[in-house]
Amino acid sequence: MITPSQSSETLKAIRGSFLDFIDDPFYVPESESVRYIADGLLVLENGRVKEFGAYDTLKHKYADLDITSYTGRLIMPGFIDTHIHFPQTEMIAAYGEQLLEWLQQYTFPTEGKFKDRNYAQKVAAFFLDELLKNGTTTALVFAAVFPQSADAFFEEASRRNLRMVAGKVMMDRNAPDFLMDTASSSYQDSKALIQKWHKKGRLLYAVTPRFAVTSTDAQLQMAGKLLQEFPDVYLHTHLSENVDEVELVAKLFPESKGYLDVYDQVGLVGERSVFAHGVQLTDAEFERLSEMGAAIAFCPTSNLFLGSGLFKLSKAKSDQHPVHLGLGTDIGAGTSFSLLVTAHVAYKVAQLQRQRLSPFRAMFLATLGGARALYLDDKVGNFDSGKEADFVVLDMRATPLMAFRNPGSTATSLKELADQLFSLIMLGDDRAIQATYVMGELAYERESDRPH
């Protein structure tokens, strides 16, 4: 029974089927890395996990507690998006170019609008609501070059009490004049934003040079200086996405030994450094990322949309040189806010290379894998005691087709669960998200489930 000091006002409980991960199924057998409780109870206190286990084991201890029950639903930790651009929300699904041309034709003109603080606030609000609608509770986010765009994002994220990492873009060449800062101003603006927002509530800052093409060596050195001054902030940029991009970087930085080396020479490769894409990485670059504890954001819908290529999943998750890896939607070259859809396409990218991405491995990348990539696995990513209670309630029968595919009851084995989970990845999207919780509070509920 709960004690008087643990009144029902501070405690709450959720009942349902639970799936999370306690280790990496790329390296540890799924039977040992997957935690599945067919009928479980998640007990929350002040927005954190207090206790988690089988309902039959815990029900007597919490007999006086009101329980929110999600019968027939699968509850997972909130999804983690390791690479996304909030200013590109309105230009998602812009037709017909590869990376460098796409930036000039669509991205840069759109991002110019974010000089207007009110406009940035409006888009940030829509963007964050869309993330919650898709079950995403943590993301690593690009703002625009304007400091006020980052301010607007952080304000909206703070209002929703979200665990978010973001930063203003640094960009001082090879872009329109109206979008460029300077090495000096990008340092000063970024430093002011770090001092204002980093570790404020659940917010964290990422130093964000767009990519080597749009930063001079002087600006990249300023980014490195920020990391030295604030060693617990993040570094977030793009790396080896497109063949033409890699060739251009080689011309712009003739002294470098390769694309990753451009960043490495100025101290940008280390823990909490997250590099989006990595489609064209060499074996030596994978090894260096592994050695330094850096991470890659695998963005399959974007890589296919822009024709960038097929990410070498087996290289990133090799036994010899494992690299921290998460999934990224990369809106707006990415074509869906849904990490279910992103996992779906990741599976197909692996298939095209005669590799296998099991449903458990895919959803590990979307949860605990993403948390590890962001060095946030002490705070989010699974249901361990003390973790922040961000989670998503999934409806495996959300559409007529999904219901037809999954007529059965709650899975009673990992084999049965794997089949159901795979069908969710293949057929699911935002419609499969029944509810999203942030720090134990309901933050989104599917309209059809709201009381009328």
Image (cartoon, grey):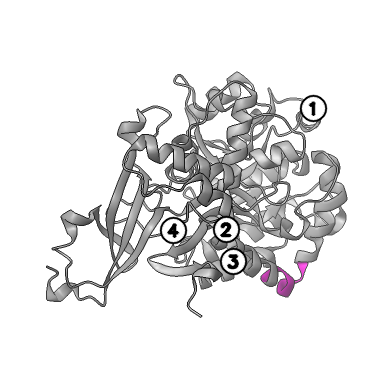
In the shown orientation, is residue 409 left or right of residue 281?
Answer: left
Q: Is residue 91 left or right of residue 375?
A: right
* Label drawn at residue 129: 3
* Amino acid carrying mark 4 in the image: Val
- Crowdedness of circle 3 by 10 Å Cα count: few (<14), some, many (20+)? some
Q: Distance from label 2 to label 4 (Cα)?
A: 11 Å
Q: Position of residue 414 (x, y in %)?
A: 35, 37
Label placed on residue 247:
1
Instruction: Determine the secondary structure under disc 1.
Output: helix
**N-term-proximal mark, 4 vs 1:** 1
**x 57%, y 66%: residue:** 154
**For the stretch drawn in magenta, what is the main secondary structure?**
helix
Q: Which residues are magenta?
A: 115-121
Assess whether residue 118 is covered by the magenta stretch: yes
- Front residue of this view, candidates 94 and 414: 414
Give left or right: position of 103 versus 85: right
Question: Callout 3, which amino acid?
Answer: Asp
Which badge, 2 or 4, comes first in the chain's sequence?
4
Q: What is the number of the mark on residue 431?
A: 2
**Residue 246 drawn above or below residue 134:** above
User: Where's residue 357, x and y in %?
Assistant: 52, 30
